[in-house]
Image (cartoon, rainbow, N blue to C red):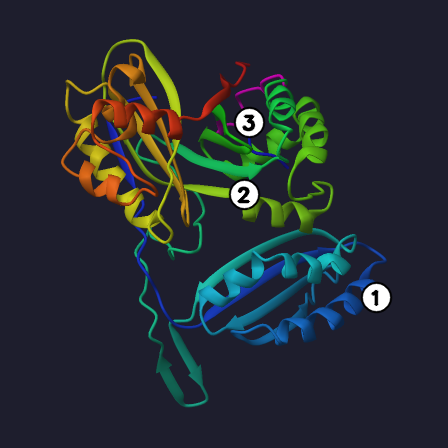
Amino acid sequence: MTLLSTAEETATTVDRPTTGRLRVVLMLDVHDGAQDRFLEAYELLRYQVSAVPGHVSDQLCQSIDDPSRWLITSEWESAEPFLAWVDSPAHREMVKPMHGCVSDTRSLRYSVLRETRGATATDTTATPLRPGEHHPAVPGTPRPGPDGVVRHALSFTVKPGAEAKAAELLSGYRSPQARVDDTTRLLRTSLFMHGNRVVRCVEVAGDLPTALRHVARQPGVRAVEEAINPYLEEDRDLDDPMSARDFFQRAALPAVHHHAALKTGPVQRHAYLYPVRPGTGAVLAELLSEEDEHAVADPGSPLVRATLYRYEDLVVRLVDLLGDPAADPAAALGLAGPRSAAVLGKLAGPAERTPDGLRRLLAECAMTLVTDRSSAED
């Protein structure tokens, strides 16, 4: 696997907290002949998981129609302890015995809203989510904006000192064909680096998982992914479904806001990684979204499009600008509107809203463009 505008639009995803129990459903396909090893691995894993804070219970089920298909369901006191565990190195060590037994996995997470046992029915304290919303700590399945484009990103780090080699490798692949099937097309991939952090932004018309599977089958792309593996700070094995799933869960950087308008002129694409005060990533993303909404509606602003990606305190802003960012650093950074003072207050370290201060902040936040390309036409 791998990850790699337009009419006036505004697509916004708003996080709304939920509370209450969490039900996790993990669907697995077990290799022929690996059933005994799988059961042994689960037997060990189940007792390790039962000791994790927040774990309530779990069940292992086998399909009565297809013996190779299995289901693990678990219940947790809330989403937070589960997510803290599933993203941890301890989790990755626990599931290693299952590697090699399983050919495919799919994980689904649900808040428990109603429960009936015998004649007793209860409501939980969980608040139902409206369509398009998701739990703030759970990246939702990326959905198309009004223009039909799905925007998503991956972020990972390479070993310090390997930045130049990583940039060389990541820029050296042939663009895959744009057409995936009758309903899905690859549109654009933009890859940036900031120090040893890599951010790859993808735009797809149609179904994102279908597009990613298509890209994963391209020999050139796969060769690049294999070549960069030794330079990653965290190991991964994309031939192992469990390892691949863990990597893409850790690397996911969902798009939480997108704003755009029709403006004419030559457009340049840039990305900014913001230094965030601990615990303020969500608020900063909301403030920057308000700034961008104001800017795209202003005919005098150079901002044409802006997409905000966030996971916890990792906040990346991808922008299309008219002209050189250095000519208007406030607009480039999302600091030209009424919430600029609030934005500055959420940044770590001193940041002055003076010409020199904005230029320093622009240089600090600016990511280096490694590659920006559209997919090849059929």
Residue that label 3 marks: 180
Splitting the image into 4 quarters, where does residue 102 fall? bottom right
Q: Name which residue type carries label 2.
A: Ala
Q: Quadrant of the C terminus?
A: top right
Q: Can you give x and y, in whole percent of width and height, for residue 124 in the image? A: 36, 76
Looking at the rendered image, the disc whose residue lies closer to the viewer, 1 or 3, is: 1
Q: Name which residue type carries label 3.
A: Val
| Mark 3 nearby-residue class (10 Å; few <14, some 14–19, many ≥20) | many
Q: Is residue 53 above or below residue 216?
A: below
Q: Is residue 6 above or below residue 58?
A: above
Q: Is residue 368 left or right of residue 307?
A: right
Residue that label 2 marks: 251
The range drawn in magenta is: 173-185
Q: Can you give x and y, in whole percent of width and height, for residue 285 in the image? A: 31, 43
Q: Can you give x and y, in whole percent of width and height, for residue 213 in the image? A: 61, 35
* 238 and 341: which is toward the camera: 341
Residue that label 1 marks: 36
Q: Name which residue type carries label 1.
A: Asp
Splitting the image into 4 quarters, where does residue 56 fall? bottom right
